[in-house]
Image (cartoon, helix red, strand yellow):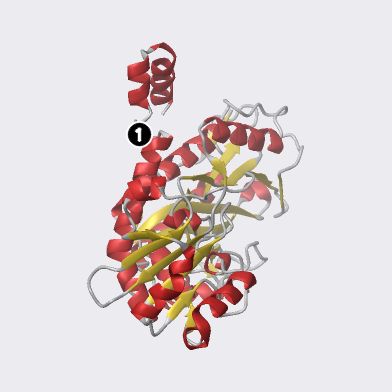
Amino acid sequence: MREFTMSFLLLSLCCTPAVVSAQSVAPESSRWQWRTSCMIRHDKFDYVLPGAMRRSGIDMWIVTDRGRGTQPMARDFGIATVNGQIIYVFYDNGDDRIERIQLGGETDLAEECAAYDYFGDMDELQAIVEERDPQAIGLNYLAVPYESEGLHVADGLTHTDFRFLESELGPVFADRFVSAQHLIADFHGERVASEIVEFSKIGAITAWLEERALSNEVITPGMTTHNDVSRWLEEQAAAMGLLRAWYPTTYTHLPDGGEIGNTERVIQRGDVLQIDWGADRNNFTTDIKRFAYVLREGETEAPPGVLNAFAEAKKVGEIIRKFVKPGRTGREQLDELKQIIRDAGYVYTEAERASDVEGIEVNVGMHAAGNIGHDMAANLFEIFPERTRYMVRPDLILSFEYIVFTPAEEWNGVKIPVNVEENVVVTERGIEWLYPPQEKVLVIR
């Protein structure tokens, strides 16, 4: 990555205008990212949307976007335009291909992308709906009370737009309005190859930056604070054209079982450090953690308790990796997984902090990832119960997240938590990596 960045910089500085122009369509450029998003849009509409609409019993899906990124799914369909209002219409006429229509908005890039069959004006909506006579019209509002973050992806229809659609389409079609929540969960829950490739690039960048942040490149024990590390990540992300998913969380696990993070506390020798962070690019958002130890004077490696805690976390990860597969709901798999973990000799806990019970405790909290950090698709996570009801679709991008609490002599028997989080893809073979996962404790000297 450093070599690529340096080569790109040198070419940009020294080359002729013709060569610089060629670089504008090179991989990772904004132009290349736009072409990639178009490719993804075509494949999603061709391969994923038909099944998602039919499983939810919806034959027309209408999505309103008032511009400026106010629609949570704006980048799924086009650009988050700064002006212009858009209505997207998707219609299933029973053929293999879903009809796609864009009404209003900026069309120059959209027409070039060619993901839509027809571009028209917003005042054509009524005629389009009447001509097709859909029996179930999906709109982006929730079918359930808003009980956890992430569901907002399926809740982008404003009250004003709902009233507009009622008035524009009339009472006959208004009686056919249904929630598109389940459609959206399947649309985000099943990924095409181009999405997996693009997401893996951003995942690799995120993990690479976190591993640099938890090194002596950034941290000088006794001088560097949590916030210094977080600010460094922010600066690196901005320099690489990444958007903020959330402010980086840099924190220390304390020997009394507590933790402290995102403060001006100076990082000390003997600290067990973690980072929880995600970056956003081209409509994909990562959510990844890394684990490190700060050597004390005279130490050449992390102490046995820290190494053992990390090793136990890896063992648990292998149990989970082989078990989670497509074809069943998150709830079914989570309930069975809890017992499998118990049968392997661990204590399963619903808490995200260690207790006083004997043994190694494990908590699993895996959620969909992809277009946002906690995405609208199947979860294996108790705090998001609505999304555990969804089927784990083939090629779901998942946050492979769990915590293992292992007693350590160095902490007088208090348990060291290892918070694992990688972004992975779920296939028929189980969980597969999208980029190199953390294989050992990162050491800060």
- At a point 59% along the width and 57% down the height, the residue shown is 70
Q: Residue furthest right?
A: 264
Q: Say which quarter of the image contains residue 215.
A: top right
- At a point 40% along the width and 70% down the height, the residue shown is 186
- At a point 49% along the width and 81% down the height, the residue shown is 178
The image shows residue 127, relative to residue 394, as above or below, that is below
> Closest to the observer: 191 or 314?
191
> Closest to the observer: 54 or 95?
95
Residue 33, can we see it? Answer: yes
- At a point 62% along the width and 50% down the height, the residue shown is 409
- For label 1, the residue is 27
| Residue 363 percent across, percent down from the top left | 55, 65
Q: Secondary structure at mark 1?
A: loop
| Residue 171 percent across, percent down from the top left | 52, 87
| Residue 411 percent across, percent down from the top left | 67, 49
Q: Amino acid at mark 1?
A: Pro
Lateral position of residue 156 relative to residue 208, left or right: right
> Closest to the observer: 285 or 340?
285
The image shows residue 54, relative to residue 315, as above or below, that is below
Q: Say which quarter of the image contains residue 91.
A: bottom left
| Residue 260 percent across, percent down from the top left | 72, 48
Residue 379, can we see it? Answer: no
> Closest to the observer: 366 or 137?
137
